[in-house]
Image (cartoon, rainbow, N blue to C red):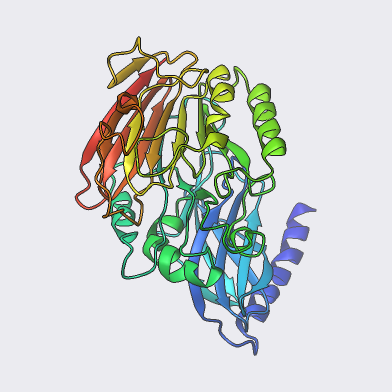
Amino acid sequence: MRKILALLTLPLLFAFSSYLKNNSYEQPELLREPYLQMVRENSATITWKTNDVTENCYVEIQKETSNKIISKQGKLTQHENNTFNEVVFDKLEPNTKYYYSIFSNGYKLATGKNYFFITNPKKGKTAFTFYALGDIGAKLPHSFADKPAKCIEKLNHKPSFGLGLGDIVYPKGESRNYDKQLFLPFENIFKNTPFYPVPGNHDWYTDPEKNFEKEWSLPNNEHYYSFSYSNALFIGLDSSKGEFYNYKEQVAWLQKTLNENKDTFDWTIVYLHHNGKTCSYKPNYEAVISIYKILAENEVDLLLNGHAHTYERLKPYNKEGDIDTNRTNHSEYKNLDENFISITVGAGGKLNNKWEPNPSDKKNCENGDIVAHYEHEPSFSLISIDGKTLKFEGINSINGKTFDSFTIKK
């Protein structure tokens, strides 16, 4: 019976494929290379942008170890006089590499060895690496977003995903600026490495529901969300313009999310756009400082942010929001306990050339002793997790050299 059904189905599939490939539809123009979102153990989302002649879309995927091709139709969304094409796959195998080809109006618009995704591993001890950077897509020619992209592309160990620490596109988060200022420099990364951004103040200057949410497919309400990878939990927050989006609701959600996942993961990383305490040229943001106690009490390990266009690593904070003065070695930490490390990685595409970093200068901060390391240069961070060991690196985007590093061992 199965053989009969298979024989009956094959002509239908062939007919569908032939219909799409041999029709009178106009060939669309690929305006944005495909990018990966929401890659999970058993699912993945692939998105690309074409002009408005597009009438339909689908994606073909093939497991690295199989000749079988799986085809899935997608949905179209009109925006800015163009068309988003999006296809969601489910029932995939965990920790598996799939190659993909994208089709619009039946025309194959992108395919090849660099078009692939790797589904998440099951919860466990699988070692992995991810990158993080903020303040990325400045207007050309003032942006150097292509520099970290090229460095990330050349890394010896491919990151499993990336985190965007807000101010993804300047000056006002407009959709029309995304292609040239973000997706073009990062196209070789995004086509095979998922990216999970949170909005910053510049992304808020134009209604995020009309811009930010249209560009991305993110969990929860897309303003704040969580996801996991192997033995780590990641929580993205929306600090809006410094005061937090829906502050009470968001902080309650943060507390609930941490409570629900207590003792479930070895590592917890929280990321957002604005800094709390700092010795950069930015002020201390009280809304961020107000969650320090929640982070410490729930054993969050890292708090990553952008906003200041520089690099700054602070010494571990306790739940009172004070530096743990008992720690003297800031290159290796053994059991942070109720402490977390706050790091600014805000020179992804812009650098503040009018400011000189100096923690001892009272103009910059009240207490320069809070700083473990600072570096005023184009940069991104690379974080590797292997079981109960975390290694953090601050990397120069121009020469690819590591200028700051530390490890946490549990």
Q: Residue at x 30, y 34 (%)?
A: 362
- Report the side of 17 relative to 202 (left or right): right
**Residue that sits furthest to the right in the current view:** 1
Q: Position of residue 161 (x, y in %)?
A: 46, 45
Q: Against 63, is 32 above or below? A: below
Residue toward you, 284 or 316: 284
- Answer whether residue 229 is visible to the viewer in this image: no
Q: Against 219, is 186 above or below? A: below
Quarter assignment of residue 403: top left
Q: Position of residue 327 (x, y in %)?
A: 33, 13
Q: Position of residue 62 (x, y in %)?
A: 53, 56
**Residue that sits furthest to the top in the current view:** 326
Quadrant housing the C terminus: top left
Q: Against 222, is 208 above or below? A: below
Residue toward you, 170 or 106: 170
Q: Residue at x 59, y 40 (%)?
A: 41
Q: Against 291, is 107 above or below? A: below
- Answer whether residue 55 is visible to the viewer in this image: yes
- Report the side of 106 relative to 322 (left or right): right
Q: Position of residue 302 (x, y in %)?
A: 45, 29
